[in-house]
Image (cartoon, rainbow, N blue to C red):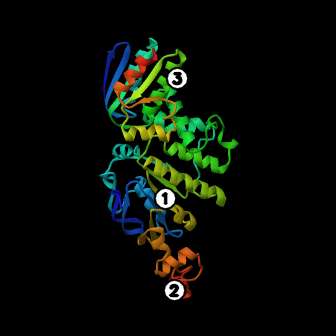
Amino acid sequence: MAQPIIEIKNLIKKFGDRTVLDGVHAVIPEGKITVIMGGSGCGKSTLLRHLIGLHRPTSGEVWVDGKNIAGLDEPGMNDVRKKFGMLFQGSALFNSMTVGENVAVPLKEHTDLSPEIIRIIVRVKLELVGLTGFENFMPHEISGGMKKRVALARAIALDPKIVFYDEPGAGLDPITASMIDRLILDLSKKLSITSVVVTHEMKSAFRIADQIIILQKGKVLQVGTAEDIQNSTNAYVQQFIQGEPEGAIPFKQTSEAYLKGLLDT
Amino acid sequence: MKIQMNHQGDVNVVELEGELDFHSSPELRARLGELTSKQAAKILVNLKKVDYMDSSGIATFVEVFQKTKRYNGRLILAGLTPAVRGIFEIAKLESIFEIAQDVQEAISRFLNSK
């Protein structure tokens, strides 16, 4: 595997009494696609928020491109954030701006480039996501899949080294979701971007991942290639892959726990 | 980034050294703007010592290309490193620009054209 660009060391995050991340260790190699997976509540979204500096760890370290971001102040964190792009779950486009203006936002905010140069960059980025000619459309005039692509063009506007994707296929039909997967693969290879994708969709993970990290109850359960995960003998992993309601992952607390909870109060 | 401008005959040669990125490209744009505003007919940019270029670099060259075209000027980019050439390819612009192997080849192309 390539050099690590992100290293997570013994990351613990507690919200009150609840431990959401319970000693996570993980390495994300440069220029590869890493998929972080797990069921609802496994801690994957919380982990992502640590990687982009939205949460501070209770303890542990998060190294991004040579800096422990856990100890950075806000200006320091903003410097690191310029190196990465983020594709938000709901696309998060500004509805009052055209497609082109949306893609231009990070360029206007973080650079001193002239409007003419920004306009050219926007056109190049829109071409990269297959949206040449849509510059002057408004978000409400395009489909959900196209909005995702606009959001992706915006995420790569500043030529980031790392792009984070939060559930990129959420809310899309299977064909559109697989088109977005292809785009993630394509951009990662062409632009040598490190991609970190958080998803619970197995098909998508197997299609795009160089490395898959499976989280369970705030811990890393297994790390491997798509093939490793598919061939895993771990009961939790197999249950997750198959999407079975019954198995090693308890769907609900036992009736004893329920009764104990009721009677203890 | 270092930007040096000189002449070889009637060719305006722009020598670049360092990284052409969001920070340095506005200065390059200004210097190239000096040439296009006086409608320099022959502009040669030597990229041999540029090991990194981002989208703003490519956009800067697109703009110069548009301007030179408007007044029938000619822009040749020379000495592209594989990394820089890759950026042109990703943006699907390598066939739009006139690209020479090195400065010598570019100069001889200018000479042969007239």
* On screen, residue A148 above or below A262: above
Q: Give the side of residue B84 with respect to residue A251, left or right.
A: left
Instruction: Please state which amino acid type lies under the numbered disc 1.
Output: Val
Between residue B97 and residue A180, name the one nearer to us. B97
Under circle 1, the secondary element is strand
Do the residues marked 2 and 3 share a common chain? no
Under circle 2, the secondary element is helix
Residue A58 place in picture, x, y as percent: 35, 62
Separation of residues labelled 1 and 2 (CA atoms): 39 Å
* On screen, residue A227 above or below A207: below
Between residue A6 and residue A12, name the one nearer to us. A6
Q: Which residue is mark 1?
A: A197
Q: Residue drawn at (45%, 47%), measured in percent from left and top?
A: A191
Q: Which residue is mark 2?
A: A260
Residue A102 place in picture, x, y as percent: 56, 39
Mark 3 or 1: in front is: 3
